[in-house]
Amino acid sequence: MKLKVLGCSGGIGSGLQTTALLLDTDILIDAGTGVNDLSMDELVKIDHIFVTHAHLDHVTSIPFLVDTAGSMRHKPVTVHATQPTLNILRQHLFNWYIWPDFTRIPSQQMPYMRYEEIVLGETVDLNGRRITPLPANHVVPAVGYQLDSGDASLVFTGDTTTNDALWMVVNKIENLKYLIIESAFCNEKQEIAIRSKHLCPSLLAVELEKLERAAEIFITHLKPGEADLTMREIQACVGKYNPRRLMGNQLFEF
């Protein structure tokens, strides 16, 4: 399995893109603005989108991808999410007011897009690529994902804050190789992090103490203008884990 980082920032500007990860050539994990840099040929190959949660920085490219590539494909794009997240997408995005309902275009029998409910802890197997929703703790219904090739696993926490349930699962993953975890705010904004259910370096330090597996750790969702400061604070708090900043176009093979 190969995972390419299309976007991993907490905002946009100066080349920064919001969360989108491309698994091999046909699966997206979230679909933030990072999807915009894909070529037309690459967009057409996307068969599956696994959504962590319905916030705009994680789903903004789904409407444009489906609208752009739908007529060039022979089957609908499948959007995988938990039932609460699917309900939000139906009611607040693909609702004919914000965007057309592409589960009914060009017809209900032959749509450009379809929904597939996922359930926390239940693995979706796509030709040996095992994708399992993990617990997340955010202000809207949310999950993270374990991506398991059989040889190794990568865990992406998605947007989350203090979350004991996550570590109970992660610590059982024997082939864990990579952990991508967020730290959206610097320590000065800890109260904002707490209210919005994100992490900051001091909260991240508490969470990583719960990790019992060896893994390469990467930090995502850093806010523009604060990223360097936040990474310095992370090094000061949890330098023993050697966390690194996740970068656009970074490639993981596992």
Image (cartoon, rainbow, N blue to C red):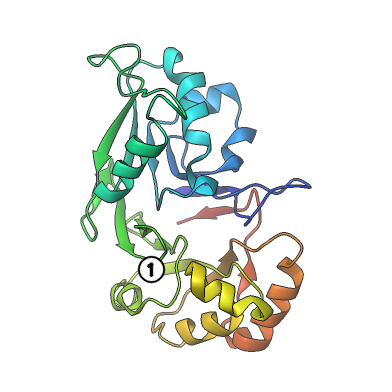
Q: Position of residue 212 (x, y in %)?
A: 39, 84
User: Along the line of sight, which residue is nearer the eye, 121 or 177?
Assistant: 121
User: Along the line of sight, which residue is nearer the eye, 42 or 83?
Assistant: 83
Mark 1 highlights which residue?
137
Amino acid type at mark 1: Asn
> Does residue 242 appear in the picture of this structure?
no
**Residue most extreme to the front:** 97
The answer to whether 221 appears left or right of 27 in the picture is right
**Residue shown at 59% from the left, 61% from the top:** 221
> Does residue 17 appear in the picture of this structure?
yes
The answer to whether 228 appears left or right of 54 in the picture is right
Q: Is residue 115 above or below residue 227?
A: above
The answer to whether 101 appears left or right of 215 in the picture is left
At label 1, counting other C-alpha atoms closer than 10 Å, the crowd grade (few under 14, some 14-19, many 20 or more) is many
User: Along the line of sight, which residue is nearer the eye, 184 or 40?
Assistant: 184
Quarter location, residue 49: top left
Quarter location, residue 226: bottom right
Element on which disc 1 rests = loop
Q: Position of residue 136 (x, y in %)?
A: 37, 66
Q: Is residue 146 above or below residue 28?
A: below
Q: Position of residue 93 (x, y in %)?
A: 42, 35
